Image (spheres, rainbow, N blue to C red):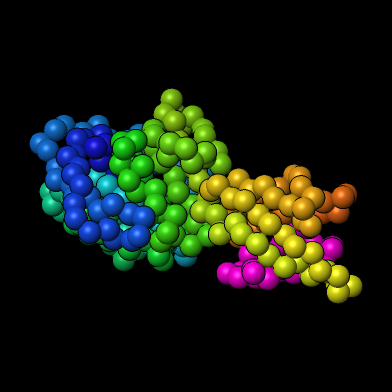
Amino acid sequence: MVDGHDRRAFLLGAAGAALLPMVARATAQDLDVPYVPTPPEVVAGMLDLAELKAGERLVDLGSGDGRIPIAAARRGATALGVEIDHRLVTRARSLAQIADQSARARFLRADLFTVSLRDADVVTLYLLPDVNEKLKPKLLNELRPGARVVSHAFDMGDWPPDVARSIAERQVYLWTIPATAGGDWRLTRADGTVSRLTIEQRYSAITGTLDDRPFRDARLHGVEIGFTIDGTRYDGVLEYHLIRSNSAVQWHADRL
């Protein structure tokens, strides 16, 4: 496995019980293989792509010598680096102290599959494709809608990125965690008329119908959803089992 932001090898194996219904647990143990540090411009580019803001929480899975958490801390974020190699954890803590960022950047020696991501606004990765594939259900299940995932070098298979960008001749990918929109909804307009809204969802891609008429120009970005039917644009915000209008057309939808 490519260690987060320091190229190394890891050995991953399947382990027993699932962490989540869709997440196969894996364990990692480092091999004594040289690593190549990620260039500072790629570190900065990943944080820029994520639009990391002061006060947000970043989790770096496979944090190596801690350069991404330390860079995030310098931007005013709170950062956690997760790393299996105790030597790199020790080094990262020392570098954070030297950078005067120990209060914002902390490091945990742990298997990246065991760490909760529920409070994270941004997750950064530098892992091999098969590891990204194993992590994908965990990311989708644990991260809140609207949270961002940035991966250096490797994508997420059939989950298309929102953005793919070349930074210093390295490929970097961005995804936004989508809310769960798929299913049947009862859409109510301001005048009291009611329609049946059916949405089919695959990651952030949605299609569907309103009273059996297909809508177009559909968009799902985090909790923001929108579509057009018969020339009328419906834009809203998903809140669990409710969609609230945030456009000129007043409407809401309740999940059936």
Give above or below for 72 relative to 35: below
Query: For the point 72% across and 68% down, which residue is it?
Result: 186
- Judge left or right: residue 143 versus residue 79: right
Q: Residue furthest bottom?
A: 192
Q: Which x, y percent locates residue 45? A: 47, 40
Query: For the point 18% across and 44% down, which residue is it?
Result: 13
Q: Which x, y percent locates residue 221? A: 61, 52
Along the line of sight, which residue is nearer the eye, 254 or 58? 254
Query: For the point 84% across and 63% down, which residue is it?
Result: 249
Q: Is residue 26 magenta?
A: no
- Judge left or right: residue 229 versus residue 6: right
Query: For the point 19% across and 39% down, which residue is it?
Result: 10
Which stretch appears magenta? 234-256
Along the line of sight, which residue is nearer the eye, 20 or 27? 20
Q: Which corner quadrant holds the C terminus?
A: bottom right
Q: Is residue 255 magenta?
A: yes
- Judge left or right: residue 200 versus residue 98: right
For residue 36, say whether it is visible: yes
| Residue 139 image-quadrant placement | bottom left
